Amino acid sequence: MTPHGETTPPVVLYVCAERAKGANGTATQYARTEGHAFAQERGLKIAEIVTDTYGEPDPVQRRGWRRVRQLVQTGDVTAVLVRWPSAIAPESAHELRHRETAWLRDRGVRVRYTWPPLSSNLPSRSDESLVISPGDAQTSNSPAR
């Protein structure tokens, strides 16, 4: 509960970063750390952390993403936190990402990007309105895609 008696909006943190099953490396840790910080700064409660191995372009073919969809269908979450758009689907399969963000939006669930360059000073920025030029994502912990 918040100080005013309201419940904290439940969200799911979706992490799809490691290229090998069972790996818990730097990319996963960055995504988890940023996701927790993002939620805390905005008064959101992470109901569940769902992970997938990066590689399969179609999100619905991944067990973790299917769990995200299940949480959405049951009304258990109000938003999906994800580090960056390519965690949902790589740029080479951007139509799959657009399909999924539209599916979420149709159910009243927002996608919120937690990577600071995508979330800073943009509390309402999400999914379809986001365009990243290749030079925008060049940091030591950005994905090599």
Image (cartoon, rainbow, N blue to C red):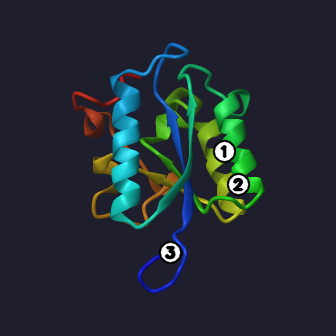
Q: Earlier in the sequence, mark 2 or mark 3?
A: 3
Q: Which residue type carries mark 2?
A: Val
Q: Nearer the viewer, mark 3 or mark 1?
A: 3
Q: Amino acid at mark 3?
A: Met
Q: Which residue is mark 2?
A: 72
Q: Position of residue 3 (x, y in %)?
A: 41, 82
The foreground one among 94 and 78 is: 78
Residue located beneath label 3 in the image: 1
Decide which of 30, 145 is in the foreground and name it.
30
Which residue is the extreme one toward the bottom? 4
Query: Which quadrant of the figure has residue 60?
Result: top right
Decide: is 58 above or below 118.
above
Q: Earlier in the sequence, mark 3 or mark 1?
A: 3
Mark 1: which secondary structure? helix
Task: Give the SS element for disc 2.
Answer: helix
Q: Are marks 2 and 3 in contact (CB under 8 Å)?
A: no
Residue 28 quadrant: top left
Q: Which residue is mark 1?
A: 68
